[in-house]
Image: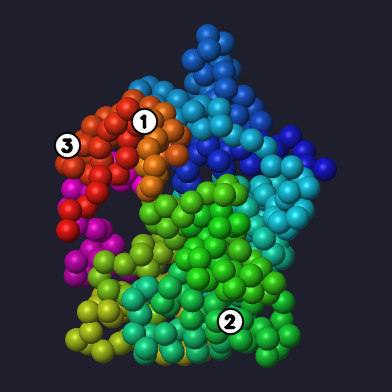
Amino acid sequence: MIDAEHRAAQAWTYIAEGGNQLAHALITASSYEQALAWVRQYGTGSVLAQEFDDVVARLRTSKSFVERTIRAWQLRLEHYSEISEVSLGRLGAQCLIPADSCWPGILNDMFAPPLALWIRGDAEVLNKPGIAIVGSRAASTYGQRLARNLAYEISESHVVVSGGAFGIDAQVHVGALQHGQATNSRQSTIIVSAGGVDRPYPASHADLFTQAIAHGAVISESALGSAPQRHRFLSRNRIIAGLAAGTVVVEAPMRSGALSTARHAIDCGRPVGACPGQVDSPGSQGSHALIRDGATLIRHADDVREMVSWQQLQLGDGMGEDIFSMPDDGFDPVLEKVWEAIPVRSCADAQAVARVAGVSVQEAQAKLALLELTGRVSRSVRGWKRAKIKQ
């Protein structure tokens, strides 16, 4: 029987995106159920508890930001439907909260831990010592071989954590699963999914996800059915790093999600290592920059075990450039979330776009107007749709 707290936690994974500080603060100050009640009551004329005002005051954020955020949550909440226990049982999925015995306590070191975790597979694997191994999707043959072999070797002592994507991620899981099959282990690897645990991405990796569920787990902070949108990939990187005692970057260019994972590991106070590649290879420049700035040079699994057995020095103390800060190229994350929320083959009104994007209707309308000005969307009597790209 699912209790009220777990039901409310499931709703929170649907209405709030990962890492939302307001959601985390409201839940921490009260409970999942009470925080959800505050969201429902906001703006209705009901007087909210003093605790709500105290939380908002401590965050030192503007009232307009709080109002926009809660309006966006309310919009999603209007379309939320609870998932029956029968459906969850059929899928083999459950939603974990910090009060659960199998919640991975290692995540509590994070600045923005997940509100809750959806999981398919063995929840006990989340509390086994883990190593995150990540790298580029456009991996070289060398990088893929190195990732597969490294994962196989480290599986002797650790559960391997990665993101299930193309390139390095896939080879990491394959190597861990091969070791699990060779040793008859049921706790080999963890895939941290950018979408719901019922939506393998990429779709061609459906078999890989199925094997991970059978020999470990697939987890996500996003609700069942959630699409693997771009911002969720960046958000899930912090969970990959947070679950592991250390992070290894096998092969990565200077602009890479793998470096994002390394940054999150450092923020958690965890050691970071990187594998060397050809010095003139663009695909290894990010790895080389990590090593130059103090990351442990990784050749094989023994280097990884040594790395996590010692306190890692802080990287980048006045040495070289900041390899973790992306250049300011005018990227607007809210604009892109709104763009991704527009259906590919049909039209949608501003309210539907706002709900999928997780923003208020007013924000969605403003960004849709900008997208229309740049020719990326068009408007008709049926709603907004993506504009056809001229060849």
Amino acid identity at mark 3: Leu
Q: Please report the bounds of the magenta region as a residue range.
A: 315-341
Among numbered discs 1 and 3, the one appearing first in the sequence = 3
Element under disc 2: helix
At 36% from the left and 64% from the top, the residue drawn is 257
- Classify residue 378 as left or right of residue 221: left
**Disc 2 marks which residue?**
176
Report, in whole angstroms, how far the alpha carbon at label 2 lies from the one at label 1. Answer: 49 Å
Sequence-wise, the earlier of marks 2 and 1 is 2
Tell me whether circle 1 and circle 3 mark residues in contact (CB < 8 Å). no
Tell me the SS state at disc 3: helix
Query: Residue 347's quadrant in the figure?
Result: top left
Farthest residue toward the top?
45
Residue type beneath disc 2: Ala
Decide which of 61, 202 is in the foreground and name it.
202
Residue shown at 45%/25% (left/top)? 71
The percent position of residue 281, horizontal first and vertical second, equals 23, 84
The numbered dot on residue 302 is none
Percent coordinates x, y for residue 109 in the rendering: 53, 55
Q: Answer with mark 3 or mark 2, whichever residue precedes in sequence.
A: 2
Q: Position of residue 339 (x, y in %)?
A: 32, 44
x 70%, y 72%: residue: 214
- What is the x, y in percent for residue 365? 30, 29
Per the rendering, the mark at residue 373 is: 3
In this picture, is 229 found above or below 171? above
| Disc 1: which residue | 382
Q: Which amino acid, mark 1?
A: Arg
